[in-house]
Image (spheres, coloured by chain):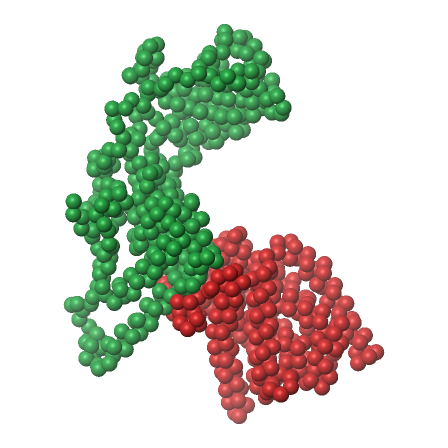
Amino acid sequence: MNEFLQGGLYGGGIIVAIMSSLLFVLWTERKMAARMQSRIGPTFTDPLGFLQAPADVLKLLQKEDIIPEKADRALFNNAPLLGATVAIAGAAVVPFSATIVGADLEVGVLYLLAVGALGVLPVFAAGWGSNNKFALLGAMRAIAQSVSYEVPLVLAALVPVILAGSMKLSDIVAYQSSHHWLVVWPFFLGIPAFGLFMLAMLAESNRIPFDIPEAESELVAGITTEYTGMKFGLFYMAEYLHTVIASAVASALFLGGYDGPIAPGLWWMVLKTGLLVVAIYWLRWSLLRFRSDQLMALCWRWLVPSGVVLVVGAAVWVVFAG
Amino acid sequence: MAVTPPPLRTVDTGAGFRHPLYQVMLETPGLTVGTAALDDLLSWGLTKAMWIFPMATSCCGIEFMATAASRVDIDRMGVIVRATPRQADVMVVAGTITTKMAPRVLKLWEQMPEPKWCIAMGSCAISGDFYRNLYSVVPGIDTFLPVDVYVPGCPPNPEALMHGMMRLQEKIQRQRKGENVVPELNPDLLKITQPSVPRLNEATRSPTQTLEQERASENPTLDEETDPLVVPPSEPAPGLAPLVGADFQALLIELGVAELPKDGPPVIPAAQHLELARRLKGLGYRQLVTIAASHWPAGKGRKGADAAEVEHHEIAYALRTVGPGSRLASWAVKVPVAEPVLTLAGVFAGADWQEREQFDLVGVRFAGHPDLRRIMQTENATTHPLRREFPADAHLAPWR
């Protein structure tokens, strides 16, 4: 009973904390995008446009909920919910500090990869359920992309697992705090694996430069073409959740997680995650989008082979030097 | 002339609403204040995040893009431009809407979820402007869409559109408070911006109004005394003659045409022109430059020998050889209006669309054409607007 209570409290707390962090993330992105394009960004919602995200949500809540007549209602209605759920489910195993962790599973990394793979389902449900050609084309692209980039993602996540000798995220962080952060030593394994992980994660969450599933110039709005109001809002939110949680996982796997001097662990985790989120948005507003075939070529011709080399390298390192 | 514009929308203020729960709400202290505050919050959310669906068809679209770019930055008021109507709140119609486009605009408007608003940006969207008497242009989008804010200009500058958005915010907030918002229109301006076609929100507009009644209510803008058929004589361009191939001339002599007339293409008997086109193609004239038809009514108002002409179509054809030293071959065919012309679609694939266009606009029928449908006008159009009897200022109403 005690465990259930603890799990409920921790889980609820973590979900509330991450949801409220979206407020900052959305504002940061709008403002950053504006600054990078010599604009100002939202200013009409005081202070400094900070209340833009609540205004968006209030508006989305008031919009008419349109379900296309020939849509598959069950798929169409449940896809946004499933999308948001899957996006936030990854947060369960992320250690935000030595004590704040929802469920410190023995197979934490495996769980994360499994939840990441589930992300294909809502996309497919939305694309198929909308009964719209643009949504279906977007879903096809998204599935091809997600399934392909799963491979380099797994390979990159295997590197810290092999080095730390555990799939438990808190063990990986503990290994890094007793030895070195993986991007520091062995850096020739840690830095490429970190880069590979971030690239594959960007592709998994369909962000620029890998956002071909919702390429506006070709596919109207991709899988969300037929969604109105808060259903679209949930997809929108899931995208940001994905970014935040992917950044948190990457900082736990490669940047030493909550490990850091002076300040308590939680602050280090928040700082590292925040920096990674900013880096992702920086990339998003700097780069153009890949073409579909270039995207696949990048994955299968470059990322997968380099992932294999990294995994073999990590094994050799553990046997002979570790 | 005093013009009293009718209200855009009527707002139900709740007077006469009898419901036990409503009575409880009125009598509970503080509850009305609370719901009013909640409503303020909701309308704040509506006005601070108005996402735009850009219905940009022409030059106003460029100013619209400038509004979203760095100098004006409409994102300051929380505006995002969405590509799908399902996620948009405001449709900005920026540009001329043709009768063929209008049903699509209406469809996109109907795909937007409520609550939604419409901004008519620029004089073409407001009234059709100087295209408004043209057969193909809608004289103002408020003939078929409920417009909330008019942004005048040709095109309006980005600041004007920003101002229009702010007026829309103001309007939404005032309407949520139960005020009846009426458009402020200067009567003099009204005469210019509102042509005599009935608007969607006008009480005087009858849904059963016929085309004749509508036409009778309009201001004639064309001088009817002017005879459109008197054409000043023109000299042939000096550089044109050497271009015409000698082989084409030889072919014409073979067909019985003695020499090239100076003021236009030689007229070929209608029965021979398909054969002529085939043989020219064999001689290397492989590019079909144009097919242009014109409609000539019976000789009224015309001089000399032309006065005796019966009503007929004249279709001019032009072919070219491809490559350096290009040679031109052009001829015309005259047929009475009731008779069809033989199609060239079997000889030149490009004749397909050109003949469809001449059929659509002038009404020439092409015998043997594989797919003689309308191409420029709406699918359900009934008229051929380039015929002489077609009134120059007629508003057809297929967009309603």
Residue A195 in view (yes/no): yes
* Chain B tint in image: green
Residue depicted at x 33% and y 51%: B151
Residue B251 in view (yes/no): no
Name the foreground residue: A285 vs A257.
Answer: A285
Query: Quick check: A211 left or right of B57?
Result: right
Residue depicted at x 39% and y 16%: B233
User: Residue B375: x percent and y percent?
Assistant: 43, 35
Task: Name the residue at the bottom extreme.
Answer: A2
Quarter holding the C terminus of chain B? top left
Name the foreground residue: A82 vs A298.
Answer: A298
User: Residue B30: x percent and y percent?
Assistant: 24, 81
Residue depicted at x 49% and y 29%: B352
* Chain A tint in image: red
Residue depicted at x 23% and y 56%: B182
Q: Is residue B317 above or below residue B198?
A: above
Query: Quick check: A295 left or right of A86?
Result: right
Query: Quick check: A201 left or right of A54?
Result: right
Q: Is residue B239 above or below residue B155?
A: above
